[in-house]
Image: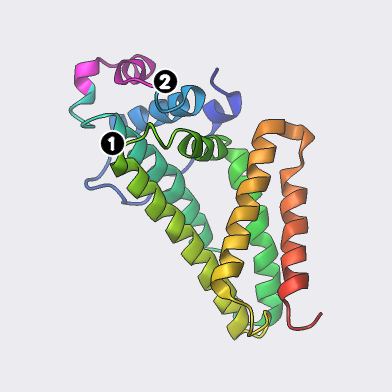
Amino acid sequence: MISPARKNAAPPAPPGTQARRRGSLDQVLIDAAMDLFASYGYRGTSLARIARAAGVTKGALYWHFADKEEFFVAVVAKVLGEWELVFEKSTHASRAAEFRAEFGRMFDTMAALNEKNPWVSRLLLIIALESHKIGPRVLRSMRKANLHGVASFRELVEHGQRLGVFEAELDPGWAATQIFSSYLGLAMLWYLHGPRFDLRRSLRQQAREFLRQWSVAK
């Protein structure tokens, strides 16, 4: 069943991560594929099902995407591209106090993005649970995206160290994996339990805990 939250979402166009510029029909197809992958999983989503959902013939799909793997890569690129645009605009602190505030807002932003598009967590679950069914091209793409996410968190931690917020002895790589894994765990709980699990509050508490543990001034 397609979630009303997903149907009503109207995210901005993703950045130019595709090999060519996506047209309006491409976006209709990607949106249809996103809903289906999230609802039925990778294996349960066929090209015929995507075509029916988008209101086009199966043959028309091949003018836009070569196969189901390319659809899945495009869906993931759309979601991650939207996230990257948001975070690029939110990390420009030049003083310690500004960094602490931005660090907390970053966790608020992660909660807001999940609430806006609940399929993010669902897609992550699909990748984890169906990795043995997904082709190597998709897995390589996802692993690259995950490594990029960890690298972004690492840069954030290193920026905090340069501003004197985080301890110099803190291992940025380890701290980045802690941020990434804690976010994923809380997002999964929220996806499974819905409004009974307060994702925004939990992420805020996690941000405060990281600042408490890693800050120079205890």
Q: Is residue 45 magenta?
A: yes
Q: From the viewer's perspective, tell me whether residue 77 is left or right of residue 83.
A: left
Q: Which residue is mark 1?
A: 70
Q: From the viewer's perspective, tell me whether residue 195 is left or right of residue 43.
A: right
**What secondary structure is found at the residue carrying circle 1?**
helix
Residue 164, placed above or below residue 171: below
Q: Which residue is mark 2?
A: 44
Residue 177, placed above or below residue 172: above
The main secondary structure of the magenta stretch is helix
Number of residues whose C-alpha sits closer than 10 Å to that of mark 2, classed few (under 14), some (14–19) or many (20 or more): few
Stretch of the chain drawn in magenta: 44-60
Q: Position of residue 78 (x, y in %)?
A: 40, 43
Which residue is drawn at the image coordinates 30% and 34% (left, top)? 69
Which residue is drawn at the image coordinates 44% and 59% (left, top)? 147
Q: Quadrant of the C terminus?
A: bottom right
Q: Is residue 188 magenta?
A: no
Q: Amino acid at mark 2?
A: Gly
Q: In this view, which residue lies farthest toward the front? A: 132
Q: Is residue 10 visible?
A: no
Counting residues from the start of the chain, the first of labels 2 and 1 encountered is 2
**What secondary structure is found at the residue carrying circle 2?**
loop
